Image (spheres, grey):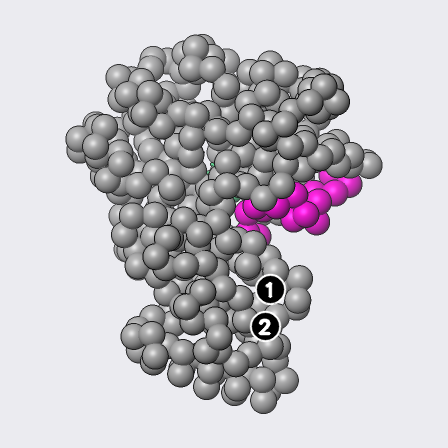
Amino acid sequence: METEVIQIDEHNIDEASKKSLQRAGQIIRDGGLVAFPTETVYGLGGDALNPDSSRKIYAAKGRPSDNPLIVHVADFEDLETIVKEVPDSARKLAKAFWPGPLTMIMNKNDRVPYETTGGLDTVAIRMPNNEIALELIRQSGGFIAAPSANTSGRPSPTVARYCIEDLSGKIEMILDGGQVGIGLESTIVDLTSDVPMILRPGYITLDMLKEILGEVEVDRTIIDSNSGAKPKAPGMKYRHYAPKGQLTIIQGEQSKVVEYINRKAKEAAAEGKKVGVIGTDATKALYDADVIKSVGNRQDERTIAHELFKVLREFDDENIDVMFSESFDDSGIGQAIMNRLLKAAGHNVIIL
Ligand code: TXA
Ligand code: MG
């Protein structure tokens, strides 16, 4: 299959872009797949109410079919037509955070096929904050099932280039809307339990949810990698976000971290390995290795969220064998950053 790539400027959707979005919507209505930008990461979209489309999504990603998909809507009223009932908490959260990087889990009704929910009776729903995504959803009939647009296991794409790398030849169309704003996938909150529970941390933090709902819990498996418990979001159990080379996170006082990484980088280089370092704006100049990248500025962790997946992908582009990364504070949005970084490193952490 030939994959068409179309560029659209989210902030200037002209007539030609509208026509492209109509065509993209028709592809999805006809059971085809279109990758598109959201504010978090690129999504691989198909008709959420068509079981064949969901099967195609799993096939294109190489994803296990017990790992449910998120249904994307553009209008709150549409949500009401695919769930058993809309909890009060969902109305409050939608008012506060939609469109935006928050996914809510509710009990599904019969309109949503089990192919989309990985066999579960619940469905994950979100309204993305991106004009290209919202228009595509409307043009597609209102419900787009979309996992991140990467081959299963690889870092989620935050630029179209990596959707093209993973999905070219496997899907009908890719909409290139430039680099996404946030860079990490949405926060997932389960509203079917007595107390709402965060199943995947993201840009919407625990404190932000508590402010709206009062009591909110966090799935223990997110915080404690050794708990042995099964994550409640099926996707969280899989190896994820992994670059091709081996990544180790080094935690400790800054000067010690720099010294340790430089020493290890030298050793690895002596063994003929190509070495990459993930530093920050403040430390980048202190390292000595084949490829050194700053992932952002610690004073504004949003910059780190924005760059993390892209940096991991760039190390793959440069065939890096061994990578070392600084560690980050795990409060607020740092919880999402560390959740992804730890997974990318297979929980390989050195504490100095
Ligand atoms: O930001 C995002 O959420 C992106 C963009 C494209 O919207 N999407 C995304 O989808 O990250 P995906 O498929 O890569 O991750 C969805 C996660 C998986 O861990 C999955 O197991 C979980 O959501 N999930 C989906 N439906 C669920 C359900 N009914 N119950 C529990 N977990 C669910
Ligand atoms: Mg994903």
Residue that extends furthest to the right in the rendered view of this protein: 2
**Contact between labelled residues 1 and 2, with CB atoms less than 8 Å apart:** yes
Where does label 1 land, which residue?
A: 315
Magenta-tinted stretch: 154-171
Q: Please state, as top left, top right, bottom left or bottom right, where the C terminus lies in the image.
A: bottom left
Residue 108, x across and y down, in percent: 41, 19
Point 43% across, 71% down: residue: 283
Find numbered disc 2 in the image and state the secondary structure of the residue it sits on. strand
In the rendered structure, the answer to whether residue 32 lies left or right of residue 254 reads right
Point 40% across, 82% down: residue: 260
Q: Amino acid at mark 2?
A: Val
Q: CA distance from mark 2 to mark 1?
A: 8 Å
Q: Nearer the viewer, residue 330 or 239?
A: 330
Point 65% across, 24% down: residue: 13
Residue that extends furthest to the left in the rendered view of this protein: 214
Q: Specify whether residue 64 is painted magenta.
A: no
Q: Specify whether residue 155 is painted magenta.
A: yes
Q: Nearer the viewer, residue 1 or 267?
A: 267
Where does label 2 land, which residue?
A: 291
Residue 170, x across and y down, in percent: 74, 39
